[in-house]
Image (cartoon, rainbow, N blue to C red):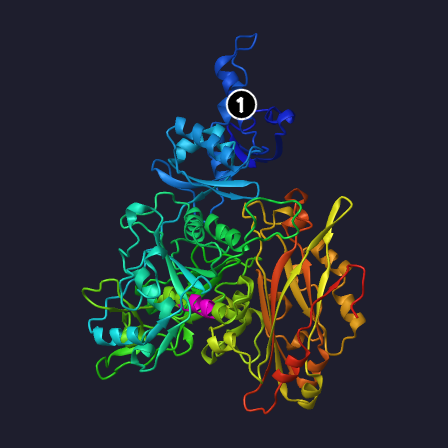
């Protein structure tokens, strides 16, 4: 770390005395002031105690001239401890003031003895100083994250403890769940009628949604058949598994049934193809004491997996924390990324697979408080997505709305805030995140309800027609409750994931995620914000507000004659060892089974090619620049499509190993280094495609052109596995899902599905690094 010292009076000290080469401490620069000097000193990790040793000598030893040793040093660097704390503080918010006990996340450098020894050794020292250390910890590459309660002064004085710390971050409070007033006109007869018409799937082969929330009151008539008593859990037995708040029961109803308005009004039999698990992660009173939300999420994950490890499940969590985010990883979001990646608990050097049990997480983007809705839509652009919504591997869900109709005779002074198909007033965005290499969020949006302005002044949440209908936890008062916001949208996306898992039981978590994103579309209201000729910055803002658009269950679930969809699940080894270096490895080349004759027959008619590439990364969240070996992602993958006018040889030259290695070394892989001759046809383009671990875009052209776009290459780019030889992962294989669709305009009489069906399955061709694409 680099510590800034103020030396006063000016010129009092020979700055060479600050250099102790044996410990690696050196002066970087000196800035002269009028009365004092600022000296920047580099202190290697673990050598802060070199300062303490000099101070100890000053206090305990005299020179042969009966003068304290290092007196000049001690007299002019009294602020060294404060400087060390400030240097270690890496959070986006300001460091806390002195005097008040606070909760801190301490990111410790892992000792050679392992994570548990690191945590216990630190805790032993901390407890001697009266610092409270919570029992849980989270482990990342070379880092252990713990939570402590202390004053800033205590940590500043504990120089031995700071010597073990790599970063200090704040702990944000848990966001208070928004709960609308209950619908006073409950209709118990409707609920009982729907319960009698509903059939719930059963058995271990059925997909599950694990809801991490405030618990569920499973005695509700619409929940009891889809949520077994043995699948009700709480992180602590004293909490009980019932819902003390109401939010969890509302979300349970949406996860199982969706918005209850339509199924309640229907008279037809109704089947729910998935089931529910519940883990209560919030205490009935107060807050969670550990303050490590990643650790809480990890414990909740184990709670449902330990008794039923082989269930196919989607994890849904609507809890977020209040506070600024910039898109950079937190302990919470990185833990979710690590759980989603599914690295084995025990590293097996002989295994070629880096993943053992990947998981699918669906997270809320976080809400704009309803009093601020009067400033819509500007307030949404200014309200950043909340932690842990910046997770790379999870599906982060924002809210849109189609609900605009209400009884204007009853509410003549009301006017809806959002237009149909637009951003819900509650939805946060990532427009305020800086332009870095973090993913765009949210990934998708779903129905979150609407609100009104009364006489263009007062914000109204609702009326009821502009909200979603779900199950109530207070059954003595009402069986139905209104709900909405990004929590409701998240529940709907989790429900879609479960339906996809039921329809396609062999699909991976990466594939289900890809299908949700692949099926999303921008509504006319969303596209209306673009100018006639949109520039990249306009499309960037579209991504930061809506992700890849509003979900569509039909698009995600179905393949039709005019919209055939090809789904590939493949493995790839991103890197290989070459001498003392780790290099980029093979390309997976997929030949597309396009019906060339049918496409050529379309001539100049417009056809769309939609591609989505989904994979999970192994996170490295320690804040050390996130460049070179400290990159957050373990590996990166990209796709490239052969151009319509491009020969096989030209396509190979465009994506060949030399070009990719050069781009990786120059940091250009995120900037669109691989030029596509058909780039004008892509909606987002290479630069906007390259963020995160999900890449999706649509190319628009003619049928004749598409007939010539015959191959898709999936290839690796850089990551910390490649740049950090000590990671020990160069020969590991990872999974990815590739979803490809052809789309023609509605009303065109053409069958593209059947000729494709005749040609598949077409396996991937693994292209050796020295071979040509042919």
Residue 223: horizontal and vertical position, in percent?
A: 31, 66
Split into 4 quadrants, where in the image is the N terminus?
top right
Q: Residues within 10 Å of mark 1 (few under 14, many from 20)?
A: many
Residue 638: horizontal and vertical position, in percent?
A: 65, 63
Q: Which residues are magenta?
A: 492-499
Q: Is residue 646 above or below residue 440?
A: below
Left or right of 503 on screen, residue 406: left
Left or right of 453 on screen, residue 206: right
Q: Quadrant of residue 39?
A: top right
Residue 591: horizontal and vertical position, in percent?
A: 71, 73
Residue 668 visible? The answer is: no
Q: Count the numbered circles shown.
A: 1
Residue at x 39% of width, y 49% of height: 172
Q: Nearer the viewer, residue 564 or 366?
A: 564
Residue ranking furthest to the front: 203
Q: Nearer the viewer, residue 132 or 161?
A: 132
Left or right of 95 on screen, residue 748: right
Q: Nearer the viewer, residue 32 or 53?
A: 53
Q: Main secondary structure of the magenta part?
A: helix
Left or right of 403 on screen, residue 574: right
Q: Which residue is mark 1?
A: 73
Q: Look at the image and say whether residue 497 sits in the magenta stretch.
A: yes
Q: Secondary structure at mark 1?
A: helix
Q: Look at the image and say whether residue 475 sits in the magenta stretch.
A: no
Residue at x 77% of width, y 60% of height: 768
Residue 511 visible? The answer is: yes
Split into 4 quadrants, where in the image is the C terminus?
bottom right
């Amino acid at each position: 770390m680099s510590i800034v010292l103020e030396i006063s009076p000016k010129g009092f000290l020979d700055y060479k005395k600050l250099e102790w080469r044996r410990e690696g401490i050196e002066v970087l620069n000196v800035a002269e002031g009028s009365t004092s000097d600022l000296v920047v000193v580099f202190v290697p990790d673990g050598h802060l105690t070199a300062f303490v040793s000099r101070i100890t000598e000053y206090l305990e030893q005299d020179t042969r001239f009966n003068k304290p040793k290092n007196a000049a040093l001690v007299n002019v660097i009294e602020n060294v401890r404060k400087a060390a704390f400030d240097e270690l503080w890496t959070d986006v918010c300001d460091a806390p003031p002195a005097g008040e006990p606070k909760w801190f996340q301490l990111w410790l450098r892992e000792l050679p003895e392992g994570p548990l020894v690191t945590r216990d050794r630190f805790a032993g020292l901390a407890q001697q100083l009266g610092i409270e250390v919570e029992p849980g910890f989270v482990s990342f590459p070379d880092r252990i994250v713990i939570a402590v309660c202390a004053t800033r002064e205590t940590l500043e004085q504990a120089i031995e403890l700071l010597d073990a710390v790599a970063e200090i971050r704040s702990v944000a409070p848990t966001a208070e769940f928004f709960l609308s007033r209950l619908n006073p006109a409950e209709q118990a007869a409707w609920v009982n009628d729907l319960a009698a018409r509903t059939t719930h799937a059963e058995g271990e082969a059925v997909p599950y949604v694990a809801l991490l929330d405030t618990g569920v009151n499973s005695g509700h008539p619409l929940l009891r058949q889809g949520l077994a008593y043995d699948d009700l859990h709480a992180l602590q037995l004293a909490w009980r598994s019932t819902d003390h708040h109401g939010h969890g029961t509302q979300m349970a109803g949406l996860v199982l049934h969706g918005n209850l308005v339509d199924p309640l009004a229907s008279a037809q039999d109704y089947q729910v193809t998935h089931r529910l698990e519940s883990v209560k992660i919030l205490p009935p009173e107060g807050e969670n004491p550990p303050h490590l939300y990643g650790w809480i999420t990890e414990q909740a994950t184990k709670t449902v997996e330990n008794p039923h490890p082989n269930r196919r499940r989607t994890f849904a969590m609507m809890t977020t924390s209040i506070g600024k985010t910039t898109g950079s990883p937190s302990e919470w979001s990185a833990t979710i990324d690590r759980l989603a990646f599914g690295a084995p608990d025990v590293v097996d050097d002989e295994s070629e697979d880096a993943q053992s049990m990947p998981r699918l997480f669906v997270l809320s983007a976080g809400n704009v408080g309803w009093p601020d809705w009067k400033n819509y839509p500007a307030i949404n652009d200014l309200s950043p997505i909340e932690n842990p919504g910046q997770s790379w591997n999870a599906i982060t869900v924002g809210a849109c709305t189609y609900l605009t109709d209400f009884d204007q005779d009853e509410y003549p002074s009301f006017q809806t805030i959002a237009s149909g198909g637009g951003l819900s007033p509650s939805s946060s965005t990532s427009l305020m995140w800086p332009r870095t290499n973090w993913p765009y969020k949210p990934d998708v949006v779903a129905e979150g309800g609407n609100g009104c302005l009364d006489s263009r002044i007062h914000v109204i949440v609702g009326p009821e027609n502009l909200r979603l209908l779900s199950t109530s936890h207070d059954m003595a008062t009402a069986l139905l409750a209104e709900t909405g916001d990004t929590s409701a949208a998240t529940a709907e996306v989790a429900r879609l994931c479960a339906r996809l898992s039921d329809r396609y039981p062999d699909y991976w978590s990466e594939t289900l995620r890809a299908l949700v994103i692949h099926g999303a579309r921008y509504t006319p209201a969303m596209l209306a914000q673009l100018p006639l000729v949109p520039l990249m910055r306009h499309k960037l803002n579209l991504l930061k507000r809506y992700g890849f658009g509003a979900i569509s269950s039909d698009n995600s679930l179905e393949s039709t004659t005019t919209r055939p969809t090809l789904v590939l699940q493949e493995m790839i080894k991103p890197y290989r060892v070459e001498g003392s270096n780790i290099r980029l490895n093979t390309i997976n080349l997929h030949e597309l089974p396009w019906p060339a004759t049918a496409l050529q027959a379309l001539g100049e008619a417009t056809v769309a090619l939609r591609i989505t590439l989904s994979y999970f990364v192994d996170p490295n969240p320690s804040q050390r620049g996130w460049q070179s070996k400290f990159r957050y992602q373990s590996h990166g993958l990209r796709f490239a499509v052969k151009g319509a006018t491009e020969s096989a040889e030209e396509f190979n030259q465009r994506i060949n190993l030399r070009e990719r290695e050069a781009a990786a070394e120059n940091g250009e892989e995120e900037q669109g280094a691989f030029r596509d001759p058909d780039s004008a046809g892509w909606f987002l383009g290479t630069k906007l495609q390259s963020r995160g671990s999900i890449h999706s875009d649509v190319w628009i052209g003619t049928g004749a052109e598409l007939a010539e776009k015959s191959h898709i290459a999936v290839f690796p780019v850089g990551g910390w596995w490649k740049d950090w030889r000590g990671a020990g992962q160069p020969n590991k294989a990872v999974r990815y899902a590739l979803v490809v669709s052809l789309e023609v305009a509605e009303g065109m009489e053409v069958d593209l599905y059947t000729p494709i069906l005749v040609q598949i399955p077409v396996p991937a061709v693994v292209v050796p690094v020295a071979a040509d694409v042919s």
